[in-house]
Image (tube, rainbow, N blue to C red):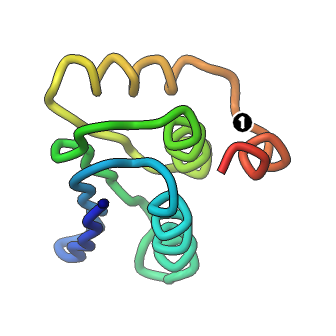
Amino acid sequence: MLRIRIHAGSGQTVLVLEGRLAGPWLEELARSWATLRSAAHAARVRVDLEGVTFVSAAGKALLARLHDDGALLTARGCMTRAMIDEIATQRPVRPEESESNT
């Protein structure tokens, strides 16, 4: 299960994720992201991964796509921060690659 909360205010939009980033929840996150990106007020979105307990390979690919689209990925846990660092240093994911992984 994945809980997705959106906090908008004071010039910043935060997408808070809690739970497992895998399976059918990836589609829901992709929809939420598309909605945020299409909103005029959401120029920069921070994705808070603090409450994420598991990330599948497809989940990591989706996070890479969000990062490539301009999302700022944040977390406090060392494993999640390491994953974010790895995503940030990889080449951009092309749309056709991320679609086949979600």
Q: Which residue is pictured at 50% across the width and 82% down the height? A: 40
Q: Quadrant of residue 58?
A: top right
Q: Amino acid at mark 1?
A: Val
Q: Position of residue 93 (x, y in %)?
A: 72, 36
Relative side of 77 to 6, left or right = left
Residue 31 position in % (x across, y down): 54, 73
**Image height check: is 86 above or below 70?**
above
Q: Nearer the viewer, residue 58 or 17?
A: 58
Percent x, y of residue 18: 21, 55
Q: Residue at x 52, y 79 (%)?
A: 35
Instruction: Give neighbour class at mark 1: few <14, some 14-19, many 20+ (Cα, 10 Å).
Output: some
The number of discs equals: 1
Whole-percent x and y of residue 81? 28, 23
Query: Left of 62 or right of it: where is 79?
Result: left
**From what the image shows, is residue 82 above or below residue 39?**
above
Q: Residue at x 26, y 44 (%)?
A: 49
Q: Is residue 87 above or below residue 93?
A: above
Residue found 26% across the figure and 19% down from its top: 79
Q: Quadrant of residue 98?
A: top right
Mark 1 lies on residue: 93
Judge whether 13 appears above or below 67 on screen: below
